[in-house]
Amino acid sequence: MQRESASRLAIDRSDIVKVVDDLAAAGLVDRTRDAGDRRRVAITPTTAGRATLAKLQSDTRTVQGDLLAPLTRLKTNTPSWTAC
């Protein structure tokens, strides 16, 4: 729901509506009113939203790998010291 999404994303509740509006306008999410409580709105990703998320996750893994590669090489080339 929007309130829970705001909390999980650390976005102010007053700002989450704009974020969801933008995602909905882009066709990435759908909103559905809760039948039991009309104040609650469920947010579900569309097919396009899931595809976009998958692409972003892949891109993130690539960038993280590129950024961390020098650290991995440094660790590999640095002697490992152990306490006696």
Image (cartoon, rainbow, N blue to C red):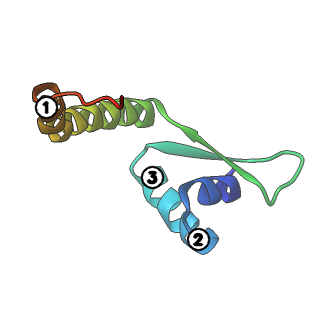
Q: Earlier in the sequence, mark 1 or mark 2?
A: 2
User: Which label belongs to residue 78?
Assistant: 1
* Place of residue 18 in the rendered image (x, y in percent of width and height, measured from the top left): 50, 67
Residue farthest toward the bottom in the current orientation of the protein: 14
**Label 1 Cα neighbours within 10 Å, binned few <14 / some 14-19 / many ≥20:** few
Task: State how far apart marks 1 and 2 are (Cα).
Answer: 44 Å
Q: Could you tell me which residue is drawn at 57 percent across and 65 percent down?
A: 17
Q: Is residue 70 left or right of residue 15?
A: left
* Place of residue 77 in the rendered image (x, y in percent of width and height, measured from the top left): 10, 28
Image quadrant in which the C terminus is located: top left
> Which residue is labeled 3 in the image?
23
Is the residue 20 above or below the residue 27 in the image?
below
In the image, what residue type sits under mark 2? Asp
Q: Could you tell me which residue is drawn at 20 percent across and 38 percent down?
A: 68
| Among the 4 quarters of the image, the one containing residue 73 | top left
**Label 2 Cα neighbours within 10 Å, binned few <14 / some 14-19 / many ≥20:** few
Residue farthest toward the right in the current orientation of the protein: 36
Q: Earlier in the sequence, mark 3 or mark 1?
A: 3
Q: Is residue 26 left or right of residue 5?
A: left
> Which residue is labeled 2 in the image?
12
| Among the 4 quarters of the image, the one containing residue 12 | bottom right
Task: State how far apart marks 3 and 1 are (Cα).
Answer: 46 Å
* Place of residue 60 in the rendered image (x, y in percent of width and height, measured from the top left): 28, 38
Q: Is residue 25 left or right of residue 58?
A: right
Is the residue 60 above or below the residue 33 in the image?
above
Q: Is residue 60 left or right of residue 25?
A: left
Q: Could you tell me which residue is drawn at 45 percent across and 29 percent down?
A: 47
- Disc 3 + disc 1, Cβ < 8 Å: no
In the image, what residue type sits under mark 3? Leu
**Label 3 Cα neighbours within 10 Å, binned few <14 / some 14-19 / many ≥20:** some
